[in-house]
Image (cartoon, coloured by chain):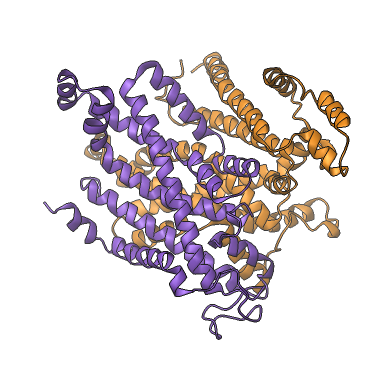
């Protein structure tokens, strides 16, 4: 039996994903070093094609596309990770309480979760941001508000399957308090599906964030990939790179996170891997 | 099953949707309360300022001087008779605006569902039949890539290639309004405009259904009833078509119902890319006009559509699978 890491790292798709995502994370961290200028600064003539003095050319106002890409990576990743963490925290709390206490509590919480799963989530995110006004904080709120239900379902299902096991009953008999049992006995056993769902949620969060920024609901004064595509779409005919380059960046990043997430799933559930 | 049983089932499912619709209404009302500035201040601001007495008068007219619970009650009472309020930007009742934009969106949804479901099911089926061959890998890799592609970006890329470079399809809109096409010519024109938005919106769901169908086929194929059928000497082709395929389809149908809400969300993006004159584009416009009555009206209508579609999916489910009892 191979270990988790052997299974995880022997998957070529995971390696491809890790390489690209690692590169994006490095660029996001060192954006200020790689492209020290403000991404909104005008650095040259507008519409310079890629390959000229600036690697990836300039946009309609003469801003450096490469600088935009590097700083955009930071905004997009930061918002995606923060909103996923918020959704994980809230979803886990609701799912754990629903699963552990059962009965009426479970009913009320799960009906609420179903409600949030039924309403059109992207439209809800748009409505939320339109009313709260666009800002990085409100983006995180809106994205996490629409992405917590799947976490709740995963955690609740796991808690239900774990809570009747002997070690949990032993903890009850030993007199451990509810929250201690949940934190130390039950939740650690829900970790692996949580990691998989969480990693896939980051990819979804990136897609939601860039769609919102594309529509002009992104964080103001923060360069982001969706914003670059939205700003470049009017010049599609004459400056194809303004839309193409940030789009490829989103596609590859989402793809690599999905590959890693699936690799995690396969490595954590080896019996299901060949399905 | 009798018609009466089916009727009772439909009524029971309709009653179950009441809390969801009520929840959306209350959510809408709360969001309106959160919105900065009420209608009176917005109108006064647009008139270039107004005396406080006038603003108070406006508030009284809109019932905004009442306690919140009374306002909620009035809001519910208005919605009960489908009064979704008035869009002061477009100078028309919200309901009329929505109904005018409903059918383009339904057309786009319908064609997308058709394309993504039929192609997705076919791709998943083929991938499962060719499991672990290079053909399976090609389909799976394509599905993974489609799954990660941002909708709005692929829409712009398709415009770039098929409209701007090749000139095969129009870039935007639903029909060529200056051509004054009628009858069949108009249908052809709308169909030509429909191609790119449909392809754009279909890609993500196509990938989703293909992956689900593949997994579902492989799971069903390993079950005991398939071994039984094989032992009885039923030809492999019949087993796949009559047994495995029909059972494998059920989770895909469920998923299509669950995904309908997200499909509506995707249409906001796609409609704004292609200037498709549906609800999504109206939502985009109302967003920047800060026309909250209209925006929340769209949200309410979309939620109702999702509820109706889920009901339809449940009915299709009953028809597809005779084992499901509806008593």
Furthest toward the left, the residue is: A1
Tally of numbered tags = 0
Identify the image quadrant of residue A96: top left
Q: Give coordinates of residue A181: x percent, y percent.
A: 23, 27
Furthest toward the bottom, the residue is: A53
Q: Is residue B132 left or right of residue B262?
A: left
| Residue B6 visible in this rendered orientation of the protein | yes
Q: Give coordinates of residue B168: x percent, y percent.
A: 67, 68
Q: Give coordinates of residue B160: x percent, y percent.
A: 63, 69
What residue do we see at 23% from left, 36% from top? A189
Q: Height in image: B57 above or below A103?
A: below
Identify the image quadrant of residue A232: bottom right
| Residue B232 visible in this rendered orientation of the protein | no
What residue do we see at 47% from left, 29% from top? A114
The residue nearer to you, when weighing A79 against B74, is A79
Q: Height in image: A231 above or below A202?
A: below
The orange-tinted chain is B
What residue do we see at 52% from left, 27% from top? B315
Query: Chain A is which colour?
Result: purple
What residue do we see at 59% from left, 66% from top? B157
Q: Is residue B235 left or right of residue B282?
A: left
Q: Give coordinates of residue B105: x percent, y percent.
A: 67, 44
């Amino acid at each position: 039996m191979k270990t988790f890491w052997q299974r995880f790292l022997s998957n070529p798709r995971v390696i491809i994903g890790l390489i690209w995502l690692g590169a994006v994370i490095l660029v996001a961290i060192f954006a200020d070093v790689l492209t020290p200028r403000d991404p909104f600064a005008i650095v040259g003539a507008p519409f310079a094609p890629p390959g000229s003095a600036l690697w990836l050319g300039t946009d309609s106002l003469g801003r450096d596309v490469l600088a935009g890409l590097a700083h955009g990576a930071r905004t997009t990743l930061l918002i995606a990770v923060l909103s996923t963490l918020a959704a994980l925290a809230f979803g886990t709390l609701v799912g754990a309480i629903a699963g552990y206490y059962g009965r009426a509590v479970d009913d009320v919480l799960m009906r609420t979760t179903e409600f949030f799963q039924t309403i059109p989530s992207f439209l809800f995110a748009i409505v939320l941001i339109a009313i709260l006004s666009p800002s990085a904080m409100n983006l995180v709120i809106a994205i996490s508000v629409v992405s917590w239900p799947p976490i709740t379902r995963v955690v609740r299902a796991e808690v239900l399957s774990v809570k009747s096991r002997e070690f949990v009953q032993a903890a009850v008999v030993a007199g451990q308090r509810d929250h201690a049992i949940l934190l130390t006995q039950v939740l650690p056993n829900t970790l692996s599906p949580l990691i998989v769902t969480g990693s896939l949620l980051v990819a979804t969060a990136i897609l939601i964030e860039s769609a919102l920024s594309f529509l002009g609901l992104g964080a103001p004064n923060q360069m982001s990939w969706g914003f670059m595509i939205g700003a470049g779409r009017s010049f599609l005919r004459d400056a194809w790179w303004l839309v193409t380059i940030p789009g490829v960046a989103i596609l590859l990043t989402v793809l690599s996170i999905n590959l890693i997430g699936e690799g995690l799933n396969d490595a954590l559930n080896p019996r299901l891997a060949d399905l | 099953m009798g018609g009466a049983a089916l009727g009772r089932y439909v009524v029971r499912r309709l009653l179950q949707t009441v809390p969801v619709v009520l929840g959306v209404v209350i959510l809408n009302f709360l969001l309106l309360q959160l919105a900065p500035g009420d209608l009176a201040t917005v109108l006064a601001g647009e008139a270039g300022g107004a005396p406080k007495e006038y603003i108070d008068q406006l508030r009284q007219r809109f019932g905004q001087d009442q306690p919140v619970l009374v306002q909620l009650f009035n809001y519910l009472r208005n919605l009960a008779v489908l009064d979704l309020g008035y869009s002061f930007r477009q100078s028309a009742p919200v309901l009329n605006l929505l109904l005018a934009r409903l059918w383009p969106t339904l057309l786009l949804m319908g064609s997308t569902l058709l394309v993504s479901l039929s192609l997705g099911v076919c791709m998943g089926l083929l991938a499962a039949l060719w499991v672990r061959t290079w053909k399976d890998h090609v389909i799976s890799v394509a599905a993974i890539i489609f799954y990660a592609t941002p909708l709005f970006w692929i829409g712009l890329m398709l415009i770039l290639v098929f409209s701007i470079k090749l000139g095969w399809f129009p870039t935007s809109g639903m029909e060529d309004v200056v051509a004054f096409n009628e009858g069949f010519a108009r249908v052809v024109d709308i169909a030509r405009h429909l191609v790119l938005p449909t392809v754009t919106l279909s890609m993500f769901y196509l990938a989703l259904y293909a992956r689900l169908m593949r997994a579902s086929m492989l799971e069903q194929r390993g079950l005991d009833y398939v071994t039984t059928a094989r032992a009885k000497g039923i030809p492999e082709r019949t087993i796949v078509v009559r047994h495995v395929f029909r059972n494998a389809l059920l989770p895909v149908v469920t998923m299509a119902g669950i995904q309908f809400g997200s499909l509506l969300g995707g249409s906001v993006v796609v409609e704004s890319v292609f200037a498709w004159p549906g609800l999504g584009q109206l939502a985009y416009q109302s967003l920047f006009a800060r026309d909250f009555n209209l925006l929340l009206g769209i949200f309410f209508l979309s939620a109702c559509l999702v509820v109706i579609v889920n009901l339809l999916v449940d009915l299709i489910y009953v028809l597809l699978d005779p084992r499901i009892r509806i008593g």
